Image (tube, helix red, strand yellow):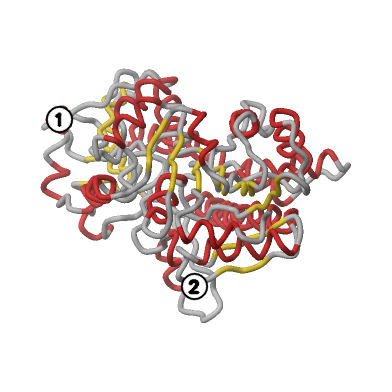
Amino acid sequence: MFQSLYDNLVSGKEKLSLVGLGYVGMPIAVAFAKKIEVIGFDLNEEKIALYKKGVDPTKEVGDEAIRETRVQFTADPEDLEKAKFHIVAVPTPVNDDHTPDLTPVESASRILGQHLTKGSIVVFESTVYPGVTEDICVPILEKESGLRCGIDFKIGYSPERINPGDKVHRLETITKIVSGMDAETLDIVAKVYELVVDAGVHRAESIKVAEAAKVIENSQRDINIAFMNELSIIFHKMGIDTKSVLAAAGTKWNFLPFSPGLVGGHCIGVDPYYLTYKAEELGYHSQIILAGRRINDDMGKYVAECLVKELIACDIPVKHAKVAILGFTFKENCPDTRNTKVIDIYRELQEYGITPVVYDPEADADEAKRLYGITFSEKEALKDLDAVLIAVKHHAFEALTPDDIAAFYAKERETKILVDLKGMFQKEDFGAPAFSYWRL
């Protein structure tokens, strides 16, 4: 029943479905559609309508690729019954108390289960802690479908590694971890992904191993960035430029090239909490991982406090000060504002009575309004400012010259406060007394 699934997919006798068409799912659907028949399903009817019109709201593959793709976009769950190989790529966020929010993956399992047919293979890509696929998703699939896992359908796990906004590290160029509930499933899942992943696949020995591999990838990165952020705080107190220190230390062959910064998004700022949650269930309280999370979660507040101190040092009244925040997305050159840490800076500045003006030509303005109640300003509004904070390293901001930036400030500002979080510019170009330049 399962042995012929791969051949049937390649020959066009069977179809693959992609459940969840966001920044991760949509590029996967488009890639597979170049090789086999693909059904792209998402509950968001507005998003589906855009895809059908040839519009890519994620900017991951571009409008032209969407117009040319053979993906059958749909918001009708019944269309899932036409597919035999299913990939679930929905977000797995955390709640306000940092516990895992499995609602999206549970909901997707419920919908898919209601339309699952015998002989199907279901592969989850959502980042989870070890055990979620088999202990939480499988029971839902069985209950909703009336089918038995291992007999009527099989499951696998292949963690997503897509990096939103990254045009170099793509689905095709990143080694794909694959796993299956048994050897047969693993072989089929590996062959299917090999259709689109030029870099090849790594066959994990179990689903739990694959789940664990994914969750530690971003936990490791989170800890390393937290170390850089802590160094930045220490060096700032010493009056030392952190970027200069890292440039010097980076001349050693085995020094890891990490930089300080805000840690948001759906992976690095979230995945560690999935791992520590499971560890707590097993009676172990994480120390290093949670310490890193605390540092990174507090960086927005720290940046805002440093900016306020700059205002005071320059004899600029803090209350009612007008400060521009350039960039609101969770990372550069990407429209996604979900789980952005720039919001922490924005809210902290408001606590001081400061009026933040947010400008971001890349961000999804409607999403920011819906999620945070923030209305972006146009570039023309960047004038008569008391300080400028460049929070995100968009290409559009890298093109700014010192004269461009100087024009944003109030004419009476003899010293122009510029906070360049990511160190985009050369500090020599913004020297005193014309500028008070600071970066992490």
Position of 339 compared to 65: left or right? right
Tally of numbered tags: 2
Q: Secondary structure at mark 2?
A: helix
Give x and y (percent) for residue 404: 12, 45
* Residue visible at 69% across and 52% down in the picture: 211
Q: Are marks 2 and 1 in contact (CB under 8 Å)?
A: no
Q: Residues within 10 Å of mark 2 (few under 14, many from 20)?
A: some
Amino acid type for the residue under numbered disc 1: Lys
Q: Is residue 160 above or below residue 95?
A: below
Position of 352 compared to 70: left or right? right
Q: Earlier in the sequence, mark 2 or mark 1?
A: 2
Is residue 432 at all visible to an observer of this figure?
no
**Can you identify the residue that label 2 sits on?**
249
Position of 139 compared to 295: left or right? right
Give x and y (percent) for residue 307: 38, 36
Is residue 22 at all visible to an observer of this figure?
yes
Amino acid type for the residue under numbered disc 2: Ala
What's the CA distance linking mark 2 and mark 1? 39 Å
Q: Residues within 10 Å of mark 1 (few under 14, many from 20)?
A: some
Residue 1 quadrant: bottom right
Q: Is residue 373 above or below residue 8?
A: above
Give x and y (percent) for residue 206: 75, 59
* Residue visible at 71% across and 54% down in the picture: 212
**Can you identify the residue that label 1 sits on?**
383
The front one of 88 and 174 is 88
Q: Secondary structure at mark 1?
A: loop
Give x and y (percent) for residue 408: 15, 36
